[in-house]
Image (tube, helix red, strand yellow):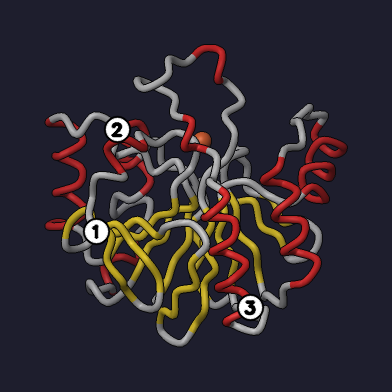
Amino acid sequence: MIFITGDIHGTIEIGKRLNTRNFPKQRELTKKDYVIVTGDFGLIWKLDAEDQYWLKWLKKQKNFTTLFIDGNHENFDLLEKYPTEFWNGGKIHKINDSVFHMTRGQVFNIDGLKFFTFGGAASHDKEYRVEGKSWWRREMPSQEEYEEGLKNLVNNSWAVDYVLTHTCSIEILNWLNNHYSFNYEEDIMHNYFQTIQNQLKYNRWFFGHFHYDINLINNNRLIYKDIIELPV
Ligand SMILES: [Fe+2]
């Protein structure tokens, strides 16, 4: 089984979101089942005793394998130190035996379902953060990552089952701004996702970042605290 949830923000929400009371289905699962976090995983933040405790909790005490894409609130200096490995058709950083980071621009095949993954987003609270301590330029993708994403979509004939991103297309951003009186600014990443949304065949597009649970147009699903079982 595969489940999707939204931003965890490391030690702040991990214990609340994935405890057995909040997520009782985990009793039926094994390490061949997956919980995927759509960014702001946040447990590779300081790698201090607290981060290590929760990473071990996921590995030893949870009956599932944890997968995550990166959000904007990740420590990219630490995250990128993990060795890159190939897993189920895409590149991951293996954090431990049951916690994997799905890198940008990949297509993974999990239990017969294809997932296009593309983490990262611009922080809305950059001015309150310190570079290298609580904010990293690498929250935004490199040219190579954008290109690799397109190349992998071409290799998959522009068809996947699910898209997993942290932020969203321009159309979705505008929808959120209009319906929720937000004032989020467009950037190159929203543009990139718009190009993809216009061409790609997908069942559902899950994204996090905005901290709401909302079904949107064009099969987009903003996800935060919900834990959704696939297929959906
Ligand atoms: Fe977040």
138, 94: nearer the viewer = 138
Residue 191 x %, y %: 75, 49
Among the 4 quarters of the image, the one containing residue 159: bottom right
Identify the residue at horizontal 48%, vertical 67% (top origin): 106
Figure label count? 3
Q: Quadrant of the C terminus?
A: bottom right
Among the 4 quarters of the image, the one containing residue 183: top right
Q: Which of the labelled discs sits on residue 45, or is there none?
A: 2
Q: How far apart in space, not on screen, are marks 2 and 1 (Cα)?
A: 15 Å
Looking at the picture, does residue 85 appear above or below residue 47? below
Label 3 neighbour load within 10 Å: few <14, some 14-19, many 20+? few
From the viewer's perspective, is the residue at label 3 or at label 1 nearer?
Answer: 3
From the viewer's perspective, is the residue at label 2 or at label 3 nearer?
Answer: 3
166, 231: nearer the viewer = 166
Mark toward the start of the polypeptide (2 vs 1): 2
Q: Quadrant of the N terminus?
A: bottom left
Identify the residue at horizontal 46%, vertical 37% (top origin): 138
User: Please, what secondary structure does the residue beneath circle 3 have?
Assistant: helix
Mark toward the start of the polypeptide (3 vs 1): 1
Label 2 neighbour load within 10 Å: few <14, some 14-19, many 20+? many
Residue beneath disc 3: 154
Identify the residue at horizontal 83%, vertical 50% (top origin): 171
Q: Amino acid at mark 2?
A: Trp
Residue 227 x %, y %: 48, 57
User: Please, what secondary structure does the residue beneath circle 2 have?
Assistant: loop
Label 1 neighbour load within 10 Å: few <14, some 14-19, many 20+? some
Q: Amino acid at mark 3?
A: Val
Residue beneath disc 1: 94
Q: Amino acid at mark 1?
A: Lys
Residue 65 x %, y %: 27, 65
Q: How far apart in space, not on screen, are marks 3 and 1 (Cα)?
A: 26 Å
Looking at the image, the residue that sits furthest to the bottom is 112
